[in-house]
């Protein structure tokens, strides 16, 4: 991943109450970061990176993410969102319950397209499907949690140490396959 993304992660980690685990590389161009915030709010400022998609999942608490475009993402437990790192260049994150626990998955489409995970070789997830979600604009996409998505995301947490990385890799692939077959409705898109 590029230096700007590393700087953003370091800035975010500085707002967390307890030390954050560093970004976990899962595949070339795909990283995972667990997040725990105990704060009212904070601002994030970074360069526009339209080739990096961020997937955010709320495990506990609540987050309100106001983007520069005035789009807002509200995540409650079980909900998740997707946006390019262009959409959140100047944004404010607010935690109405003063606590938030979740995870973010960063996908660098430029890097992963040339070297996809073995199970996704030959699919069009990185070249067509994910970019199609944002082709009209860089507006974030909101998805309410379902039984299927909860079975995917819940496995990212509370695994035995020796099985954490395999679960993280498998569930990331499963999430990408889920997104690959999901038809988004207009109500799931937050238009600018």
Image (cartoon, helix red, strand yellow):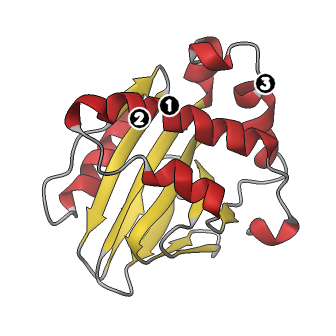
In the rendered view, would you say 54 is above or below 96? above
Q: Kindly state the secondary structure of the residue where label 1 is placed.
A: helix
Q: In which quarter of the image is residue 13?
A: bottom left
Q: What element carries label 3?
A: loop
Name which residue lies at 29% across and 50% down. 158
Front tag of 2 and 3: 2
Query: Does the CB distance between marks 1 and 2 fall below 8 Å?
Result: yes
Expressed as whole percent of the image width and height from the top left, the position of residue 128 reads 81, 30
Mark 2 touches mark 3? (CB < 8 Å):
no
How much space separates mark 1 and mark 3, taking CA atoms? 18 Å
- Kindly tell me whether residue 39 is visible in this rendering: yes
Q: Local crowd at mark 2 within 10 Å, few (<14), some, or many (≥20)?
A: some
Q: Look at 69% across and 36% down and name the residue there.
A: 177
Horizontally, residue 17 falls left or right of residue 80, namely left
Q: Label 3: which residue?
A: 124
Whole-Å distance between the Cαs marked 2 and 3?
A: 23 Å
Which residue matches tag 2?
167
Q: Name the residue under label 1.
A: 170
Quadrant of the image occupied by residue 23: top left
Of residues 131 and 181, the one drawn nearer to the viewer in this rendering: 181
């Amino acid at each position: 991943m590029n230096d700007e993304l590393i700087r953003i992660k370091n800035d975010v980690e500085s707002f967390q109450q307890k030390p954050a685990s560093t970004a976990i590389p899962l595949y070339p161009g795909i990283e995972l970061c667990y997040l725990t915030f105990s704060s009212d709010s904070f601002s994030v400022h970074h360069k526009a990176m339209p080739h990096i998609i961020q997937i955010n999942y709320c495990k506990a608490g609540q987050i309100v993410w106001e983007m520069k475009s005035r789009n807002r993402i509200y995540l409650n437990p079980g909900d998740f969102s997707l946006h390019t790192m262009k959409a959140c260049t100047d944004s404010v994150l607010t935690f109405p319950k003063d606590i938030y626990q979740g995870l973010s998955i960063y996908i660098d489409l430029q890097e992963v397209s040339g070297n996809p995970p073995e199970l996704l070789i030959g699919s069009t997830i990185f070249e067509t499907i994910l970019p199609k979600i944002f082709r009209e604009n860089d507006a974030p996409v909101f998805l309410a949690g379902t039984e299927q998505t909860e079975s995917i995301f819940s496995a990212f947490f509370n695994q035995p140490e020796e099985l954490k990385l395999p679960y993280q890799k498998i569930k990331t692939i499963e999430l990408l396959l889920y997104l690959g077959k999901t038809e988004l409705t207009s109500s799931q898109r937050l238009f600018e």
